[in-house]
Amino acid sequence: MKKQLFVLLGVGGVSLVLGVSLILLFEADHNPGLNSVFDALWWWVVTSTTVGYGDVVPVTKAGKIVAIFSIIAGFYIYTNVVAFVAESVHGFFDRHEKGTARVKVEDHLLLCEYTSMADELIQRLPSIPELAALPVVIATDLVERNPYPQHAFVRGVAINPATLKRANCSRARFIFIFANFRFADPDVKTLHIASRVRGENPTATIFVEMVDEKSDLLRFAPGNLIVIPSRKVMEYVLQHEPFNPLDWMADARDSAQIPADPDE
């Protein structure tokens, strides 16, 4: 788009300078309507836009040839300017759909990776009072457009700092990291993301979907992770049973994986 803009500016600049210079050169001694640079500039604008007020008309053959080229250049310049502006406006409003804009919500629920399990959670959010009212942000490179227009969407690899920044990870209240089965060992990827996310947000409650809920890697993972067993959740899904991920949070607290809130 920048290249297109530079081309338009170049063509417009050349047309303007040549048109004004040549029309003065060929018409100044023959045309009473062209007595100054401003008159020539006015003529060029009116001619190149094909408005054609008729107050200044070239009378020499050379002047008419300059007018022809000014009109042709004007067609190219202004039609492309309109297209450029329309594309820019559309791109601005399409950023949220394509996930290229930075979200501005805070105290939100951040979903890292859009998988079938993530979709199950999104579907069940309205039935979970503690989560239903929270804004939702989906950060993933697995889809190209926002799968849920009512929620915010950031397209990118969830482990990328730029992606996490656009998803306002540092301001999230709950963060869910779902297993990406494109990898041979999805738990490695999940915990890697968890490590990066915890660095961005030291206070959020982080849920990690684990294929192996007793993985040795959990010993080296950031503290206070809430493990969601992938197989257990799938059992709930297949049996059409309700599940609340916050139940695992309570279980973790009971198991001393996370400290109890002193105010409770």
Image (cartoon, rainbow, N blue to C red):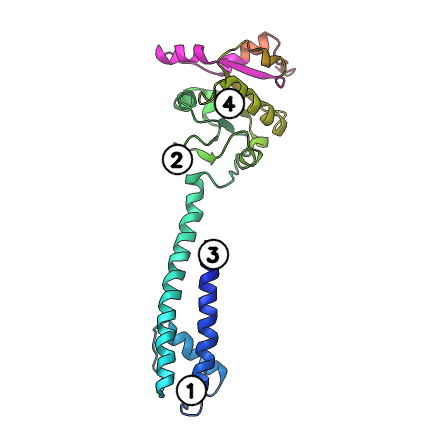
- Mark 4 touches mark 1? (CB < 8 Å): no
Tell me the number on the disc at residue 149.
2
- Which image quarter is the C terminus in? top right
Q: In this rendering, which labeled residue sits more in front, label 4 or label 2?
A: 4
- Which badge, 3 or 1, is on the more N-terminal residue? 3
| Circle 4 residues within 10 Å: few <14, some 14–19, many ≥20 | many
| Circle 2 residues within 10 Å: few <14, some 14–19, many ≥20 | few
Q: Secondary structure at mark 2?
A: loop
Residue labelled with disc 1: 26
How far apart are the two marked residues, 4 and 1, measured between alpha carbons? 72 Å
Relative depth, front residue between 103 and 227: 227
Q: In this rendering, which labeled residue sits more in front, label 2 or label 3?
A: 3
Residue labelled with disc 3: 3
How far apart are the two marked residues, 2 and 3, measured between alpha carbons? 32 Å
Residue 56 visible in this rendered orientation of the protein: no
Location of residue 40 in the rendering, given as x and y in whole percent from the top left corner: 45, 81
Location of residue 154 in the rendering, given as x and y in whole percent from the top left corner: 48, 35
- Which badge, 2 or 3, is on the more N-terminal residue? 3
Tell me the number on the disc at residue 177.
4
